[in-house]
Image: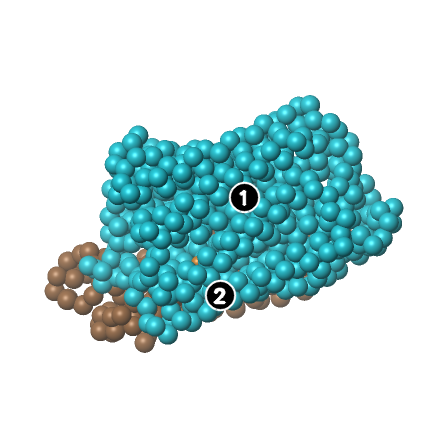
Amino acid sequence: MSYLTVDKTVRSWLLTTDHKRIGILYLGAVLTMMALGGLFAMLIRIEHLTPGPTIVSAYTYNRLFTLHGITMVWLFMIPSIPTTFGNFLLPVMIGAKEVAFPRLNLASFWIYVAGALVTLGAMLAGGVDTGWTFYTPYSASSPSAVVPTVIGIFIVGWSTIITGINFIVTVHTMRARGVTWMRMPLFVWAIYGTSIIQVLATPVLGMSLLLVGVDHYLQWGLFDPARGGDPVLYQHLFWFYSHPAVYIMILPAMGVISEVIPTFAHKNPYSYRAIVYSTLGIAFVGFLTWGHHMFVAGMSRFDAGAFGILSMMVAIFSAVKVFTWSLSFKQGAIVLKTPLLYAFLFLFLFIFGGMTGVAVATMSLDVHWHDTYFVVAHFHFIMVGGTLTGFLAGLHYWFPKMFGRMYDETIGVISVILVFVGFVGTFLPQFLLGNAGMPRRYYDYAPRFQPLHVASTIGALVLASGLVLTLYNFVRALRRGEHAPDNPWQSRSYEWLTASPPPKENFTKSPSFSLDPYAYDQPLENAHA
Amino acid sequence: MRELHADHFESLEVQAHAARLGTWIFLCSELLLFAGLFTLLAASRAHDPRGFHEGMTHAARTLGSINTGVLLVSSTTAALGVQAMRENRPSRAFWLVLTTATLGLVFLAIKIAEYAEHIDEGILPGGHGAWFASHADAPLYWTLYYLMTGIHAIHVFVGMGLLVWTAVRVRARLIVHETSYKLDLVVLYWHLVDLIWIFLWPLLYLA
Ligand SMILES: [Cu+2]
């Protein structure tokens, strides 16, 4: 009897402490957020079809890009992979029955839902037009629902911290026999590194946003120059969280890629340790780079140089990963399935986004590109091209594990192509727009920018159709997909050594793993729990 | 015998280890929250040394210092409570933990008296209030004073709640000698609250 069939009442789902069911609940929630964020993005793109007003007013436009940013960053991307695959798979991958604190885990889900409702409700009913960054002093005086929105994000932050603590403790205390630190599946390492960032960075964000709320509501003027405060100080506090937040989004996606490539190349990673240490390296250096967001906000040349170099160090760790993944294909028996195609897409977009990241980390270049569409395109390449493709790769890869059904491979391949074409079509024009001087967040633009804006909007439509097709594929699979075997990809990783979908207690008896999770030199029969 | 540990843990030791580790990580998270505030304090002070000097000479130094004493004593009684639990003397532990919570209440009462005094003088956060009309110094010190002591006071309040709840559970035998680690964790949190005050006190009242 699987975790899905053990008790079918709605109540048993809503009050479950089973980490797998909580993962599924989160999956439903973050997919909803992704759809909403995508809808807002489409409205923005349609507005830009013509210069001047197209479908909405300037104020509505400002509210729309804020809605899009806040929904995508805090309600979709930050929780996306850790709360869904992390919750579902992390305990299974280390042979544990549960996460360390199951009730806290459930609490974290409902805190997330409450926070998301407050945030969305405030933005939809009242509206916020500050952008997702809430820069002061404007955010302290903007005539919009800043206070309830930041309270909502603060609440979501609690859920992030609780999840982070839960995962760290689970990895430390609940590993089964045979799962040593250097034999944990790489996805577990990625979630572990992410959790550390979540626990240490989120409180700083929560505090800073609450202070913005206080400034707005009570006029304390902490960041208001008229009252002796310093607005750049807010930017420092905000980016101390929000740069590491990029790694909260990308590290889990890297973890998914580190699982997908060995499975579909049928080969162990070129270097397990290189991937582990670069994960920890990114988690650490990520805390020291925030200043690159303030190159033009008044910063000494020495500081700018230091932040620039530290930012580029992230590229070194990332390159170590990319080379290790690429070399893992050497002499592999490659099976081209949808998850692997998404992994290729990840590699392509991540290299592209990463290299433009090195470019904007250079102060002299950043002065030209700062606050233009170039930056917008850069971070979408990393955050969407990285997180979203990683998320989709994982969704296809682990779908049989989670639901015991197979998605349709042909539709899967078509959706990869649509996502690829649509994504590049959306954001390549934005690089060009930014380089030509189109500022970000502007409602209006000069007529000469129109062709590129139209191209970008068409790209966004293609991307959206790819995502809708993906959704159709999964819904179809849930209703009438063929039943999945326990290990459809012939993987050696630990989560595949139990039934698909797994029983409530994950493994029917306490597992003990004799092979490492990438032992593709051994016959499949030797890999068992 | 009733199982003392949850089903998904191998043993009580593992469960206690997990709870301890989780608490320490949570405390790190709390520390980062205050680190942000201390950064704000340091930067604001560098920005406005005169205003900070004038503010601090006006601060309620005596009440602040008494409160430091109160918290230090409360941390001692909390630690003695942990010791008592380890020696399997639950009723002694109960009274010590309750004393700790009461000292927290004393701290908050003094804090409120301090706030009332300043509000009476017309000192409000954000440079609001009559006092600032005759004192040209920047309001930043007072804003941060209210902000940081206020957030700290919220932590004291939460800590008190946890202490009372734990004391009740000790009395009801829901926390026993074998599971005394549960008391340790709450006391750990209390020590953190105390520790943060030890830094707030000189930075806001003395320097
Ligand atoms: Cu950054």
Q: Amino acid at mark 1?
A: Leu
Name the chain under label 2.
Answer: A
Counting labels gives 2
Q: Nearer the viewer, residue A192 or B129?
A: A192
Which residue is found at the position 52% from the left and 47% from the top? A385
Within 10 Å of disc 1 (Cα), the crowding (few <14, some 14-19, many 20+) is: many
Q: Position of residue A455 (x, y in %)?
A: 40, 38
Say whether residue A111 is left or right of residue B202.
right
Q: Position of residue A513 (x, y in %)?
A: 81, 52
Q: Residue at image x 15%, y 66%?
A: B135
Residue at x 33%, y 37% (from the top left corner):
A48
- Contact between labelled residues 2 and 1, with CB atoms less than 8 Å apart: no
Alpha carbons under labels 1 and 2: distance apart: 23 Å
Q: Which of the pair B156/A331 is nearer the observer?
A: A331
Q: Residue at x 31, y 43 (%)?
A: A449
Residue A102 relative to residue A384: left or right: right
Q: Chain B in the picture: what colour?
A: brown
Does residue B32 sit above or below A465 in this rendering? below
Give the residue number, with chain letter if any, for mark 2: A312
Which label is found at residue A388?
1
Q: Is circle 1 on the same chain as circle 2?
A: yes
Chain identity of mark 1: A
Quadrant location of ligand 1? bottom left
Rendering quarter of residue A129? top left
Which element carries disc 2, helix, strand or loop? helix
In the rendered image, the quadrant that contains the N terminus of chain A is: top right
Chain A on-screen colour: cyan
Q: Quadrant of residue A278?
A: bottom right
